[in-house]
Amino acid sequence: MGTGVCRCGKGVEQRDKFEKLDEIIESYKGKEGALIPVLHEVQQLFGYLPEEVQERVAAGLGLPLSEVYGVTTFYSLFTSEPRGKHRISICLGTACYVKGAAAIVEKLEEELGVKVGGTTKDEKFTLEVTRCLGACGLAPVMMIGDHVYGKVTPDKIKEILEKYD
Ligand code: FES
């Protein structure tokens, strides 16, 4: 690991995060079922779970790296890629799909310049798709952070995105 500074960040701030990471690992060490809560806290700390961090968690908890990778890839809660400040989720459940969700996705990809799963270069938005959000009456539905937008049309996208900084 060398300097303890990973490619996900910069200098001193990152060193502080790695110290905090070690504290989190330490506080869970030896406890059963520690992996998921540790990963959860660590993701809150870094915003995502870079490879170096997953390696450190595995070593710290004395687990095989494959077990850590297994958990982070299985649970959609975890991500090994940086995420934007605002997460956009488009519902691709049946009702939303029928009402034109695919055209919304297309418009967002065009406006943001990223594909689904991607994060804009300025790290402002991450574009994701999701299953039914349970608001089918409002189809097609899109969420940005905790805010639900219903009956979205492609021509509303630009205006909606402009609200976020
Ligand atoms: S299908 Fe989109 S909210 Fe249910």
Image (spheres, rainbow, N blue to C red):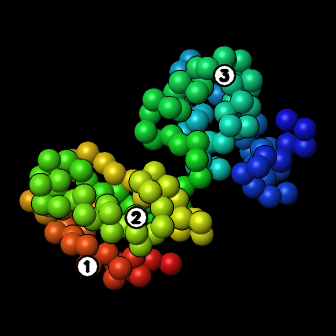
Give the mark nearest the N terminus, 3 or 1.
3
Foreground residue among 100 and 68: 100
Q: Is residue 135 above or below residue 94?
A: below
Of labels 3 and 2, earlier in sequence is 3
Q: Decide if ligand 1 comes within 8 Å of the CB at mark 3.
A: no
Q: Is residue 113 left or right of residue 67?
A: left
Report helix, strand or loop for mark 2: helix
Screen quadrant of the N terminus: top right
Kindly identify which residue carries mark 1. Answer: 155
Residue 136: image x %, image y %? Answer: 12, 55
87 left or right of 99? right
**Amino acid type of the residue that numbered disc 2 sits on in the rendered structure:** Glu
Q: Residue furthest right?
A: 3
Reading the image, the residue beneath label 3 is 65
Neighbours of disc 1 within 10 Å: few (<14), some (14-19), many (20+): few
Q: Nearer the viewer, mark 3 or mark 2?
A: 2
Measuring from the top left, give residue 132's x and y in whole percent.
21, 47
Residue 126 in sight in this render: no
Between circles 3 and 1, the one closer to the viewer is: 1
- In screen coordinates, is 144 left or right of 50? left
Q: CA distance from mark 3 to mark 2?
A: 34 Å
Picture residue at 49% right of the left edge, 55% below the top: 118
- Residue 158 visible at all: yes
Badge 2 is on which residue? 109
Q: Residues within 10 Å of mark 3 (few under 14, many from 20)?
A: some
Q: Describe residue 19's horizontal placement relative to residue 125 as left or right.
A: right
Q: CA distance from mark 3 to mark 1?
A: 46 Å
Residue type pointed to by label 1: Asp
- Residue type indicated by callout 3: Leu
Q: Position of residue 140 (x, y in %)?
A: 18, 62
Q: Mark 2 near mark 1, Cβ–Cβ under 8 Å?
A: no
Work out whether mark 2 precedes mark 1 in sequence or the reverse, and give the earlier one. 2
